[in-house]
Image: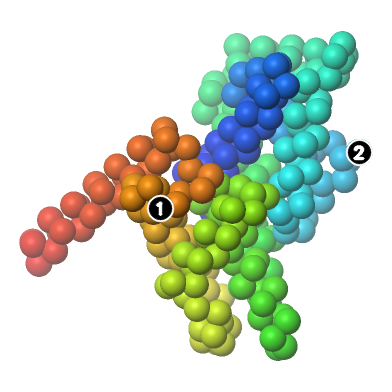
Protein backbone atom coordinates (compact mmCIF):
# COMPACT_ATOMS: atom_id res chain seq x y z
CA UNK A 1 0.00 0.00 0.00
CA UNK A 2 1.31 3.43 -0.93
CA UNK A 3 1.64 6.29 1.52
CA UNK A 4 -1.27 8.08 -0.20
CA UNK A 5 -3.48 5.00 0.20
CA UNK A 6 -2.55 4.62 3.86
CA UNK A 7 -3.36 8.25 4.55
CA UNK A 8 -6.65 7.72 2.74
CA UNK A 9 -7.54 4.90 5.12
CA UNK A 10 -6.64 7.12 8.07
CA UNK A 11 -8.86 9.90 6.74
CA UNK A 12 -11.80 7.53 6.31
CA UNK A 13 -11.56 6.16 9.85
CA UNK A 14 -10.94 9.60 11.37
CA UNK A 15 -13.92 11.10 9.54
CA UNK A 16 -16.29 8.29 10.57
CA UNK A 17 -15.17 8.42 14.21
CA UNK A 18 -15.29 12.22 14.18
CA UNK A 19 -18.89 12.12 13.00
CA UNK A 20 -19.70 9.66 15.77
CA UNK A 21 -18.30 11.79 18.59
CA UNK A 22 -19.84 14.96 17.14
CA UNK A 23 -23.24 13.24 17.12
CA UNK A 24 -22.82 12.72 20.86
CA UNK A 25 -22.04 16.39 21.36
CA UNK A 26 -18.33 15.83 22.05
CA UNK A 27 -16.46 16.95 18.91
CA UNK A 28 -12.76 16.04 18.79
CA UNK A 29 -9.86 17.21 16.64
CA UNK A 30 -8.68 15.00 13.77
CA UNK A 31 -5.33 14.63 15.50
CA UNK A 32 -6.90 13.36 18.72
CA UNK A 33 -9.10 10.92 16.79
CA UNK A 34 -6.14 9.60 14.79
CA UNK A 35 -4.12 9.10 17.96
CA UNK A 36 -7.03 7.26 19.58
CA UNK A 37 -7.22 4.90 16.58
CA UNK A 38 -3.57 4.00 17.09
CA UNK A 39 -3.99 3.58 20.86
CA UNK A 40 -7.03 1.32 20.49
CA UNK A 41 -5.44 -0.85 17.79
CA UNK A 42 -2.24 -1.41 19.76
CA UNK A 43 -3.93 -2.07 23.12
CA UNK A 44 -4.10 -5.89 23.59
CA UNK A 45 -7.21 -5.50 25.76
CA UNK A 46 -9.20 -4.50 22.69
CA UNK A 47 -8.24 -7.77 20.96
CA UNK A 48 -7.43 -6.29 17.56
CA UNK A 49 -5.08 -8.79 15.95
CA UNK A 50 -2.87 -6.86 13.52
CA UNK A 51 -1.55 -10.13 12.08
CA UNK A 52 -4.85 -10.99 10.40
CA UNK A 53 -7.09 -9.34 7.85
CA UNK A 54 -9.10 -6.28 8.84
CA UNK A 55 -12.75 -7.33 8.44
CA UNK A 56 -15.92 -5.24 8.26
CA UNK A 57 -16.67 -6.25 11.82
CA UNK A 58 -13.20 -5.05 12.84
CA UNK A 59 -13.89 -1.66 11.24
CA UNK A 60 -17.27 -1.31 12.95
CA UNK A 61 -15.81 -2.39 16.29
CA UNK A 62 -12.85 -0.02 15.92
CA UNK A 63 -15.16 2.92 15.22
CA UNK A 64 -17.45 2.04 18.14
CA UNK A 65 -14.60 1.59 20.63
CA UNK A 66 -12.94 4.85 19.61
CA UNK A 67 -16.20 6.81 19.79
CA UNK A 68 -16.96 5.37 23.24
CA UNK A 69 -13.50 6.20 24.56
CA UNK A 70 -13.50 9.73 23.11
CA UNK A 71 -16.87 10.54 24.68
CA UNK A 72 -16.28 8.92 28.07
CA UNK A 73 -16.91 11.39 30.90
CA UNK A 74 -14.09 11.99 33.38
CA UNK A 75 -11.78 9.43 31.81
CA UNK A 76 -8.17 9.55 33.10
CA UNK A 77 -7.12 7.48 30.08
CA UNK A 78 -8.60 10.06 27.69
CA UNK A 79 -6.86 12.89 29.55
CA UNK A 80 -3.58 10.99 29.26
CA UNK A 81 -4.05 10.56 25.51
CA UNK A 82 -4.83 14.27 25.13
CA UNK A 83 -1.57 15.11 26.89
CA UNK A 84 0.31 12.65 24.68
CA UNK A 85 -1.21 14.23 21.57
CA UNK A 86 -0.14 17.66 22.79
CA UNK A 87 3.38 16.41 23.37
CA UNK A 88 3.65 14.64 20.02
CA UNK A 89 2.28 17.56 18.03
CA UNK A 90 4.61 20.02 19.74
CA UNK A 91 7.76 17.93 19.87
CA UNK A 92 7.50 15.77 16.74
CA UNK A 93 6.75 16.75 13.17
CA UNK A 94 3.37 16.12 11.53
CA UNK A 95 5.17 13.97 8.95
CA UNK A 96 6.52 11.64 11.65
CA UNK A 97 3.09 11.56 13.29
CA UNK A 98 1.38 10.43 10.06
CA UNK A 99 4.16 7.97 9.20
CA UNK A 100 3.62 6.19 12.51
CA UNK A 101 -0.10 5.82 11.81
CA UNK A 102 0.70 4.58 8.32
CA UNK A 103 2.93 1.88 9.81
CA UNK A 104 0.08 0.65 12.04
CA UNK A 105 -2.38 0.53 9.15
CA UNK A 106 0.04 -1.31 6.89
CA UNK A 107 0.31 -4.10 9.46
CA UNK A 108 -3.39 -4.69 8.80
CA UNK A 109 -3.56 -4.27 5.03
CA UNK A 110 -0.47 -6.41 4.44
CA UNK A 111 -2.15 -9.63 5.66
CA UNK A 112 -5.32 -8.67 3.76
CA UNK A 113 -3.40 -8.47 0.49
CA UNK A 114 -1.57 -11.74 1.18
CA UNK A 115 -4.82 -13.59 1.89
CA UNK A 116 -5.98 -12.56 -1.58
CA UNK A 117 -2.76 -13.19 -3.51
CA UNK A 118 -1.86 -16.45 -1.75
CA UNK A 119 -5.30 -18.06 -1.61
CA UNK A 120 -5.91 -21.53 -3.04
CA UNK A 121 -9.68 -21.21 -3.49
CA UNK A 122 -11.26 -24.37 -4.88
CA UNK A 123 -15.00 -24.41 -4.19
CA UNK A 124 -17.67 -21.89 -5.16
CA UNK A 125 -17.91 -20.89 -1.50
CA UNK A 126 -14.15 -20.24 -1.44
CA UNK A 127 -14.40 -18.11 -4.58
CA UNK A 128 -17.30 -16.13 -3.14
CA UNK A 129 -15.31 -15.43 0.01
CA UNK A 130 -12.27 -14.40 -2.03
CA UNK A 131 -14.34 -11.99 -4.10
CA UNK A 132 -15.74 -10.37 -0.97
CA UNK A 133 -12.23 -10.00 0.42
CA UNK A 134 -11.29 -8.17 -2.76
CA UNK A 135 -14.20 -5.76 -2.29
CA UNK A 136 -13.16 -5.09 1.30
CA UNK A 137 -9.53 -4.59 0.29
CA UNK A 138 -10.47 -2.17 -2.50
CA UNK A 139 -12.43 -0.05 -0.03
CA UNK A 140 -9.76 -0.09 2.67
CA UNK A 141 -6.78 0.56 0.41
CA UNK A 142 -8.55 3.38 -1.45
CA UNK A 143 -9.46 5.13 1.79
CA UNK A 144 -12.78 6.17 0.23
CA UNK A 145 -15.70 4.77 2.18
CA UNK A 146 -15.93 2.23 4.97
CA UNK A 147 -16.35 -1.55 4.54
CA UNK A 148 -18.50 -1.32 7.64
CA UNK A 149 -21.20 0.57 5.72
CA UNK A 150 -23.66 -1.70 3.89
CA UNK A 151 -24.53 0.79 1.13
CA UNK A 152 -20.87 1.53 0.45
CA UNK A 153 -20.07 -2.18 0.19
CA UNK A 154 -23.03 -2.76 -2.13
CA UNK A 155 -21.92 0.05 -4.46
CA UNK A 156 -18.27 -1.05 -4.44
CA UNK A 157 -19.31 -4.63 -5.21
CA UNK A 158 -21.40 -3.49 -8.18
CA UNK A 159 -18.50 -1.36 -9.46
CA UNK A 160 -16.07 -4.27 -9.16
CA UNK A 161 -18.48 -6.64 -10.90
CA UNK A 162 -18.78 -4.23 -13.83
CA UNK A 163 -15.05 -4.48 -14.60
CA UNK A 164 -14.10 -7.77 -12.96
CA UNK A 165 -16.98 -10.30 -12.84
CA UNK A 166 -16.59 -13.09 -10.31
CA UNK A 167 -16.12 -15.77 -13.04
CA UNK A 168 -12.79 -14.08 -13.88
CA UNK A 169 -11.38 -15.21 -10.54
CA UNK A 170 -10.14 -18.37 -12.24
CA UNK A 171 -7.83 -16.33 -14.44
CA UNK A 172 -6.79 -14.20 -11.48
CA UNK A 173 -5.79 -17.28 -9.47
CA UNK A 174 -3.53 -18.48 -12.28
CA UNK A 175 -1.42 -15.31 -12.16
CA UNK A 176 1.87 -14.93 -10.32
CA UNK A 177 1.78 -13.20 -6.96
CA UNK A 178 3.34 -10.05 -8.44
CA UNK A 179 0.76 -9.92 -11.22
CA UNK A 180 -2.05 -10.45 -8.71
CA UNK A 181 -0.79 -7.52 -6.64
CA UNK A 182 -0.62 -5.39 -9.77
CA UNK A 183 -4.16 -6.30 -10.81
CA UNK A 184 -5.43 -5.68 -7.29
CA UNK A 185 -3.92 -2.18 -7.38
CA UNK A 186 -5.45 -1.52 -10.80
CA UNK A 187 -8.88 -2.72 -9.68
CA UNK A 188 -8.68 -0.45 -6.64
CA UNK A 189 -8.00 2.54 -8.89
CA UNK A 190 -10.75 1.64 -11.38
CA UNK A 191 -13.42 0.92 -8.77
CA UNK A 192 -12.57 4.14 -6.95
CA UNK A 193 -12.83 6.02 -10.24
CA UNK A 194 -16.27 4.51 -10.94
CA UNK A 195 -17.52 5.50 -7.51
CA UNK A 196 -16.21 9.05 -7.94
CA UNK A 197 -17.88 9.30 -11.34
CA UNK A 198 -21.16 8.06 -9.83
CA UNK A 199 -20.80 10.78 -7.21
CA UNK A 200 -20.28 13.33 -9.99
CA UNK A 201 -23.52 12.16 -11.67
CA UNK A 202 -25.37 12.15 -8.34
CA UNK A 203 -26.08 8.45 -8.88
CA UNK A 204 -23.98 7.04 -6.09
CA UNK A 205 -20.74 7.77 -4.32
CA UNK A 206 -21.78 6.27 -0.99
CA UNK A 207 -19.27 7.10 1.73
CA UNK A 208 -17.51 9.82 -0.31
CA UNK A 209 -17.81 13.24 1.30
CA UNK A 210 -17.85 16.40 -0.83
CA UNK A 211 -14.36 17.61 0.07
CA UNK A 212 -12.84 14.20 -0.54
CA UNK A 213 -14.71 13.93 -3.86
CA UNK A 214 -13.45 17.31 -5.09
CA UNK A 215 -9.81 16.49 -4.36
CA UNK A 216 -9.88 12.96 -5.75
CA UNK A 217 -11.95 13.73 -8.84
CA UNK A 218 -9.63 16.57 -9.80
CA UNK A 219 -6.75 14.16 -9.43
CA UNK A 220 -8.37 11.73 -11.85
CA UNK A 221 -9.05 14.56 -14.32
CA UNK A 222 -5.43 15.72 -14.16
CA UNK A 223 -4.19 12.16 -14.72
CA UNK A 224 -6.48 11.81 -17.75
CA UNK A 225 -5.14 15.05 -19.27
CA UNK A 226 -1.55 13.98 -18.61
CA UNK A 227 -2.15 10.58 -20.25
CA UNK A 228 -3.67 12.28 -23.31
CA UNK A 229 -0.78 14.73 -23.65
CA UNK A 230 1.70 11.88 -23.31
CA UNK A 231 -0.07 9.91 -26.05
CA UNK A 232 0.22 12.89 -28.40
CA UNK A 233 3.99 12.83 -27.98
CA UNK A 234 4.31 9.22 -29.14
Residue that badge 2 annotates: 45
Name the residue nearer the viewer: 44 or 100: 44
Determine crowd level at label 1: few under 14, some 14-19, many 20+ residues with C-alpha closer than 10 A.
Answer: few
Determine crowd level at label 2: few under 14, some 14-19, many 20+ residues with C-alpha closer than 10 A.
Answer: few
Sooner in the amino-acid sequence: mark 1 or mark 2 = 2
Query: Picture coordinates of residue 162 (x, y %)?
Result: 44, 72
Give me the residue at 66% from left, 74% from top: 130
Query: Picture coordinates of residue 78 (x, y %)?
Result: 81, 18
- Find numbered disc 2 in the image and state the secondary structure of the residue it sits on: helix
Give me the residue at 82% from left, 46% from top: 48
Name the image quarter holding residue 86.
top right
**Left or right relative to 20: residue 213:** left
Name the image quarter holding residue 71.
top right
**Left or right relative to 36: residue 153:** left
Name the image quarter holding residue 118.
bottom right
- Find numbered disc 1 in the image and state the secondary structure of the residue it sits on: loop
Q: CA distance from mark 1 to mark 2?
A: 42 Å
Tell me if residue 233 can be seen.
yes
Q: Residue furthest left?
A: 233
Amino acid sequence: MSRAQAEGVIRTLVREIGQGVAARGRPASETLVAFMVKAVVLDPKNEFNVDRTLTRQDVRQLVEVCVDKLTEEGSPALDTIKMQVYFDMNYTSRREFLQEHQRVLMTWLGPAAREITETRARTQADLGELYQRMVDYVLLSSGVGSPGDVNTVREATAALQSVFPQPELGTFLSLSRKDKEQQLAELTAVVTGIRLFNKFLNKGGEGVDDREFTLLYRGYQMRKVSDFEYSQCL
